[in-house]
Amino acid sequence: MRATMMYGAGDVRIETVADARLIETTDALVRVTRAAICGSDLWPYKTMEHSETGRGMGHEAIGIVEAIGADVRSVKVGDVVIMPFAYSDGTCLFCRAALQTSCIHGGFFGNGQVDGAQADAVRVPQADGTLFVLPVGIDNALIPSLLTLADVMGTGHHAALAAKVGPGKIAAVVGDGAVGLCGVIAARRLGAERIILLGRHPDRIALAIKFGATDIVSERGDEAIERVRELTGGFGAHSVLECVGLDESERTAFSIARPGGAVGRVGVPQDETMPASRPVFYSNVTVGGGPAPTRAYIPELLPDVLAGRIEPGRVFDKVVSLEQVPDGYRAMNERAAIKVLIEF
Amino acid sequence: MRATMMYGAGDVRIETVADARLIETTDALVRVTRAAICGSDLWPYKTMEHSETGRGMGHEAIGIVEAIGADVRSVKVGDVVIMPFAYSDGTCLFCRAALQTSCIHGGFFGNGQVDGAQADAVRVPQADGTLFVLPVGIDNALIPSLLTLADVMGTGHHAALAAKVGPGKIAAVVGDGAVGLCGVIAARRLGAERIILLGRHPDRIALAIKFGATDIVSERGDEAIERVRELTGGFGAHSVLECVGLDESERTAFSIARPGGAVGRVGVPQDETMPASRPVFYSNVTVGGGPAPTRAYIPELLPDVLAGRIEPGRVFDKVVSLEQVPDGYRAMNERAAIKVLIEF
């Protein structure tokens, strides 16, 4: 089969590899029909050291179940399924607590240990807990939006929950990538009264406004903090969604939260440390978030996607074939695309 | 009047100073009958640079109202009152949200700007919002426990709330100082199933067990983390109360929280940074807390103190007169005393 392999920073190749196959009795084999390139794929794309063996990439997919192991019960051959970015058994104490990204028997796709989904097929461990069977056909027009439930829409929702978004509150979203844009959708969906997007790319800002952003702050650093303060009566936002993960964006997120507010972090932190005392401690700002248990959120978000109440699939502004995936990485890295959809 | 002045590390003196007096029309003048030395007073006691003018110390007191400004409505001369460590107007948006430590017109006693309460009398700004009138006489046997509502008991309660303690959960308390011990009381009061105290002083451990601690971990660093893991089935505690503020104790607190758990920080952070990614982000551990709005918690905690259901006053194991306060600082700094009560 053909698969996306990364060999180092900027070095993405589509290669013929050994066919994906069942290994454990709890596995499913999924033929991928749609996959995506994620903002988090750009971290290794910028920094990965050269590898002789390469790393299979991709962690978001929709596809058709082609085979199941002997112990798989909840999916069957022919099902159309969403594959969330983490696999999970669905039964451990963390899965039962809706924290599938800490599953005792879980892990992550495309991380070098389990193969990736930017490929013709993917082996899905813990298929019963991991896969979500969709009630629509593989060519449904809603498939791009449904694909975002594998990661970015669920991740934006996770940020909004961790930031305690709710009716009457002011939310601020740091970052205008696909996750930040989905954070805008999530904040609106959860009833935020105002949604301030911190971003500087005109196409993304336009989409954010369609998604419900009420204010745009394009400044950076101290100027951005000052601008958010002006927009919020001097106090800052109740709920801040940190959707980048860089040191500067984290500091901005902490600084624009009002006393007693909350910051939901979903941008993978690229630095080892964050501020301990000012402003978060002295302002009693709560810092939450982490890898989103997107599997847990599919049942809640799916009806809104199916009914067209939310359209997160609009974050895909470039479509490529599997063979064109290296172009997709380049486009996202150069910010020529918000998010790339891979059609098979 | 006589007052406690700090001139530098280890240099605490009792001196005759100008009498405290009303300045603003919203002030009250309180004659102090009981005050205390706080663990947080030990930070400047260890590190303060020499000052020519000195700093009036103390931020916990019970006393009698001697005079009120023209605009004070809710307290009257002769009232027996608790003075929380922060003053607050009681009416701003943060006070209404029960976050008096972020009051727009508020501040802190004994911080160099407003004088301290380790003195014969203290000027209390924003008296209406700050002071809590007690329903008992000044010599009531419960006064030491009531005095802890000014700071340490309310601070332990704040840590427990930020750590999301609740029925059926395992709580861990990092630190066996007065705040940590009050954190044990608070965790028990909020229904924790098990309470693990991390501490190493036999007298404090004995008191923690009386307060409800079920397990004691006296190791430090990685060994403490390992021991808590062993005690919790390998997963860590649901709720961690960080009651120290040092870099090592924060790292320990983060590392013993289970995935999806919460850390409530009330120890004033002595370092600028804390870990950003592992373990808190990858485990979706929520970090909350800060300066406790103890004023907000008095109505909730007071009935339990009056009924004898909680006895936080037992943290006072040394009583001094105002003139003996320098001995009290020495005793606390050398850990010869858990917490010092000042009787006038």
Image (tube, coloured by chain):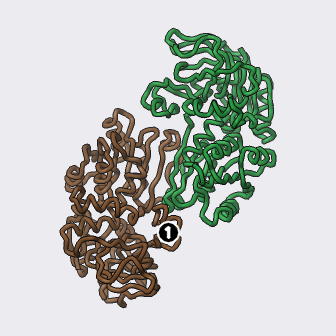
Chain colours: A brown, B green
Determine if residue A329 is in view: no
Q: Residues within 10 Å of mark 1 (few under 14, many from 20)?
A: many
Residue B305 position (above or below residue B255): above
Residue positioned 46% across, 66% down in the render: A101
Could you say where residue B2 lies in the image, as x and y percent from the top left? 73, 17
Count the labels in the image: 1
Determine if residue A70 is in view: yes
Which image quarter holds the C terminus of chain B?
top right
Residue positioned 76% across, 26% down in the render: B141
Q: In the drawing, does residue B166 fall left or right of residue A149?
A: right
Could you say where residue A317 lies in the image, as x and y percent from the top left? 20, 65
Q: Helix or strand or loop: what does disc 1 sit on? A: loop
Could you say where residue A111 lies in the image, as x and y percent from the top left? 43, 75
Q: Nearer the viewer, residue A79 or B120?
A: A79
Residue A313 position (above or below residue B133): below
- Read off the residue under disc 1: A103
The quadrant where residue B4 appears: top right
Check the image and name the residue furthest to the top: B70
Residue positioned 79% across, 47% down in the render: B206
Chain of the residue where label 1 is placed in the rendered structure: A
